[in-house]
Amino acid sequence: MSVFQEYFDESHQLVRDSVRRFVEREILPSIDDWEEAEEFPRELYLKAGSAGILGIGYPEQYGGSHEGDLFAKVAASEELMRCGSGGLVAGLCSLDIGLPPLLKWASPALRERVVPQVLAGEKIIALAVTEPSGGSDVANLKTHAVREGDCYRVNGSKTFITSGVRADYYTVAVRTGGEGFAGVSLLLIEKGTPGFTVGRKLKKMGWWASDTAELFFDDCRVPVENLIGTENMGFACIMANFQSERLALALMANMTAQLALEESLSWASQREAFGKPIGKFQVLKHRLAEMATQLEVSREFTYRQAAKMAAGKSVIKEISMAKNFATDIADRITYDAVQIMGGMGYMRESLVERLYRDARILSIGGGSREIMNEIIAKQMGL
Ligand SMILES: Cc1cc2nc3c(=O)[nH]c(=O)nc-3n(C[C@H](O)[C@H](O)[C@H](O)COP(=O)(O)OP(=O)(O)OC[C@H]3O[C@@H](n4cnc5c(N)ncnc54)[C@H](O)[C@@H]3O)c2cc1C
């Protein structure tokens, strides 16, 4: 019987088993090569689409399954993280940040055209909010879109966009109105639209297997039908989207910590120093006990917030707390895991070396630690 039966039922276990098999069959044998190549094959989207993995949590009418079942999504994303590459998961799952605004607010015609292709893995979608001038202050974004007849003329640029090089569709935040949050809209911009170019693939500290790009819009003409929601309501859509992104990042952080803990336990029981396994030294036993404690608390708190979200409750403050807590402990536990493994922890052949690098983005992306604290403080009335 699962310790987490309060959150997960048998159908979630089936999701877990099938995603785990997919990871073992399709990802684990090649992940080290894909990390070194800083790319995974585009074909993997098609495979994940036909295995039904990309569609988990999305409506059946578009090819999805388990719509509205948040813990099916949680189970799937945890199992995907067992591939040990945050970059692969971020890239393969960029639909989870690019698609929801479209699904909730785009016209039926746009939804019907785009969503099934993305869930099938035939097309890739990215979310483009961050700009070279800044990512935290979303309300002040500069890329602007001016309505001209049946098109918007878009000028500006975006940066650090996950799946930015390979995507076919981009959910792009633009300024259609005056200054501040009330002037922001979302447009679906398609690869190949004249005036839209993709810049260089950016080299990163971690998340090597994901592609991260700059995007440029130079008098790019986007049909008005590609407006997502109504004009100037984009900020609210982006903020709503952030809630599920922050949950996903907290789950990713917890799984990063889980893998680091598993690696540490295995190493500590095998590696010997001064005539005994290093795990027999009290200082390491205590460190492992603390790592396990931090992870357990973080995971339980994250699940609790997911359960409240699933019940339709607002968890703006708590999800920010969960993200900060989980990303903090992922940083700490991956640091400790490298330490426990000694020199081997520093080697590229060790999983913990990658986990340590990959963890670092989690407290920056999707709203930084400082922005989470701003939100928490505001919710506290400070
Ligand atoms: C690998 C990777 C993938 C990414 N993927 C995407 C993506 O797919 N789509 C997308 O749109 N973006 C993406 N991002 C961008 C990411 O969301 C931003 O980097 C993040 O929001 C921070 O924005 P910034 O880098 O411009 O930092 P800035 O906003 O310039 O902030 C710099 C520092 O100042 C701090 N700061 C800012 N404001 C305050 C304040 N009020 N109080 C205290 N401190 C503050 C920040 O916390 C940070 O420490 C990605 C980034 C990376 C590195």
Image (tube, grey):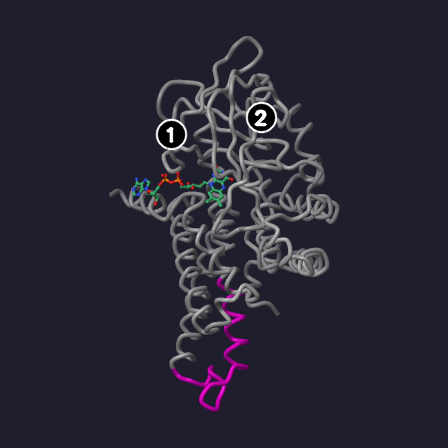
Q: Secondary structure at mark 1?
A: helix
Which quarter shows the N terminus?
Answer: bottom right
Who is closer to the viewer here, 49 or 86? 86
The secondary structure making up most of the magenta span is helix
Residue 193 found in image quarter? top right
Residue 291 found in image quarter? bottom left
Q: Residue at x 62, y 51 (%)?
A: 37
- Measure how far apart labels 1 and 2 are at the Cα level: 20 Å
**Residue lying furthest left:** 382
Question: Do the numbered discs 1 and 2 sit on residues whose CB atoms are within 8 Å?
Answer: no
Residue 139's tag is: 1
Q: Residue at x 59, y 22 (%)?
A: 226
Asked whether, in this view, residue 15 is left or right of residue 74, the answer is right
Q: Secondary structure at mark 2?
A: strand
Question: Which of the two discs, 1 and 2, labels the residue nearer the N terminus?
Answer: 1
Who is closer to the viewer here, 38 or 380? 38
Which quarter shows the C terminus?
Answer: top left
Residue type (three-letter) at the residue carrying disc 2: Ile
Provide residue 232's location: percent of width, then percent of height: 45, 22
Q: Is residue 275 magenta?
A: yes
Instruction: Count residues near mark 1 (Cα–Cα under 10 Å), then give few for <14, some for 14-19, many for 20+.
Output: some
Range of magenta residues: 257-282
Q: Is residue 344 above or below residue 166?
A: below
Residue picked out by circle 2: 189
Q: Is residue 365 above or below residue 126?
A: below
